[in-house]
Image: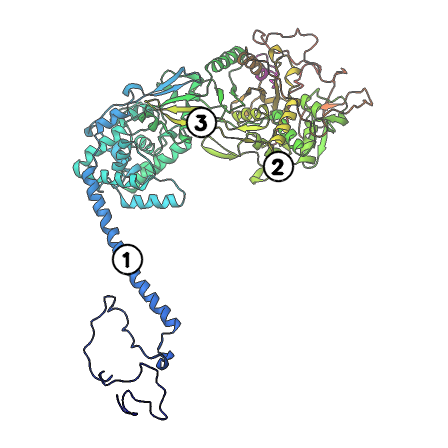
Amino acid sequence: MGGPGGPGGPRRPGGPERRPGEEPTDLLPSVHHATPREPDLLTHREDELAAEPVYDEDEYDDEDEPTETEAKAMRRKKIWRRVRRTSYVLLGLMILAPVVAFAIAYQVVEVPVPEQVAAEQNKAINILYSDGSPMTKIAPDGANRTMIKYEDLPDTVKHAVYAAEDPTFEENPGFDFTAIARAGWYQVTGRDSGGSGLTQQYVKQATKDDSPTLSRKFTEIVKAYKMSKQQDKNDILTAYLNTIYFGRSAYGIKEAAKVYFNKDLKDLTQSEAALIAGMIQNPGRSEQPKYTLERWEYVMGQLVKFHWADQSYKDTEKFPAMRPLADLDQGGIDGTRLYIKTQILNELEKIGYDMARAQQVGATIYTTIDPGMQTAAEQVIDNVMTGQPEKLTYSMSAIDPTSGAVKVYWAGKDGNGIDYQKGTLQEPGSSFKPFDFVAALQKGEGAGTTYDGSSPRSFPGRGDVSNSPGVACKVPKQCSVREAMVKSVNTVFYDMVVNNTGTQKVADAAHQAGIPDEVEVGDKKYKMLVGENGTPPDGNISIGGGLTQVRPFDMTSAYATFASRGVYHEPFFISKIVDADGTTVHQHIDKSKAAFSDDPQESQDIADNVTDVLKDIPKAQARTTCAGGRACAGKTGTQERANTAENSKAWMVGYTPTLSVGVYMGTEGGVDAIKDKGGSDIYGSGLPGMIWKQFMDRAMDGQPLEPFAKPNPIGQFEEPVITPTTTVPPKTTTPKETTTTTTPEPTTTTTEPPTKPTTTKPCNNPITCTQQPPVTSTTDPVDPIGGGGKPTR
């Protein structure tokens, strides 16, 4: 043991107190003696800061510890170092992966064989009626295709195709990077563009795959590149032009030359070749004049841009006239039924299943057209219109109100003119008045609400409005909506709309029922039921005149909404499509909604109240009364010719609980007077009403006599009891905008003008009658349920 002051001894006086184990010992080396460095631990990292020496707790200096800011900086430095390293790896993969994938795909993919592709496309499209019976067949057994060789292609055709689809075809490696980038930009900005070169388009045709996926596009590019390496450009172009679809049921460029211009390829002018090449992008629009003109002008411009044509040639060349569609073989369908085929092909495009795709799978298309009803329509129209003036134009359609299925589509006298169902806009006259009533019902007014039905009446900004000759309410100053609708009292509905509901509410009601917001007629789009410069419609909408114009088909659809008790069903022509194996590839899905209110019950009540009024109208004339006491409802309409007392359009639109039918009649352009073969003016209850009634009787023959539902009354439902204060009949005028000229009134005290002259024997069989009773005096029939407003031009 040591002494008091030595090691192990007592502490020295005045020195610091030491705890056990802290005394130095002679057996340990001095703390300042150099010793070998211990090996690093396995967890040691050289890229981190050197470890600080461990100090005694009492000797630790807080100022040597990193601040919080410094610590955060060090952590950020570590994170970014890792991000950079990861980015380098990902960038390398991004560069190498596509190259590797392209190389692998190049070895795996197979280049299509033109003959095999053509053979697989040679599948017929069968179009059937609703009962499964055949309507027509398109391109059966490879008809409409003739294979050609490269030597058969004149330069005019080659250059036109290059100009339309791929100007760099002869130099690019099977795809055009610029075109692909441009297509991507167009898609981002919401525009249409193909973005594929000729080789890619051929591959897409061959593989039958046009899905908008990156994997499909990548595979397509690889196949196009491989094809460009393995085959000569001439062979690729020939294969492409032998297999693609050009519209008009034509596959291949040689057949396209026949169906468009009835020429051989070598005889096509550069202008004609430009039009055919322009159809490649969207062949389903080959019958749309505006589109074909736009494409022709584009291709002609491209020909000049790439020096395949002179500017002088483009400037002097006119749009080439295409071969009439009626001259083509339509697979057993002709006449007015060609319009049905057009609607079916249009709907194929709409549902994203165009004819080219349908032919690739050998599709069978089940339509909604009822063959018995279609035949009945044709026979009735032929019976009624035989011997009538040739200048008359007319059309008819029928729709199942419970589903929207189009049962009949009779759009014109032949298949080479204007579609008078969807291809024309006409003033509906008084057949538009039910939408006035809808707007009033939505406001809470009912069929018993009264208005001043005097005639003429002056309205601010309009001048005089008059009723049709001979039309008068029992008490003109207190005319109920029900009486005004049955007698078609113009002044009541004009007053109702301009002074009560407002014109926009009427337009809204019509849109809710089924009149589209916008339609395309003759390749031009029209906003429906608007005033000038997009303002709300003027007061003429109340009587279906002026700027108020609609397509006849849409009126049939809108009345179907009344028949379905306030439920709108979007009309359709195709119920389903199956492929060659019988697998369903498309099934119609009903698109329906409560029309007149968000509350289905309220919408139903409104429609039922309208029907309760309209059901009295067909019964007002023998020519429109449904046979066997069947419940029918409807409204006639007659639009007058500008600045005359003659008529220019006439309508009858009506329905049973299970069928809505609309008939339109006018003349080309809608500006000539419409008169029957006896020289009498045609009203809605005349020839249109006769067609409507006879067709309805035949179509519904044998069907149960279904009544209309009893309405839940809205507002003042019943007509108020009113005692006439005078027996002098009111004066009426011819329905001119500002005229005050009156005509003598009949001295009858009945509630409506007589329907037959006293000197003429009534016509009980409209089919065998030689003419309508002539209008020879003010007591002659003047269509008490027709009447329209004078148009405002």
Q: Position of residue 63 (x, y in %)?
A: 37, 79
The residue closer to the viewer here, 333 or 577, is: 577
Q: Position of residue 390 (x, y in %)?
A: 51, 16
- Residue 310 seen: no
In the figure, residue 162 lies in which quadrant? top left
According to the picture, the residue beneath numbered tag 2 turns out to be 504
According to the picture, the residue beneath numbered tag 1 turns out to be 86
Q: Does the residue at mark 1 contact the one at mark 2 (Cβ under 8 Å)?
A: no
- At horizontal 69% and vertical 35% (from top left) the residue drawn is 500
Q: Is residue 412 magenta?
A: no
Who comes first in sequence, dot 1 or dot 2?
Answer: 1
Q: Is residue 682 magenta?
A: yes
- Residue 287 seen: yes
- Quadrant containing the C terminus in the rendered view: top right
The magenta segment is 677-689
Distance between the alpha carbons at the discs numbered 1 and 3: 51 Å
Above or below, 54 against 788 in this view is: below
- Using residue 374 as the reference point, say whether residue 120 is left or right of it: left
According to the picture, the residue beneath numbered tag 3 turns out to be 588
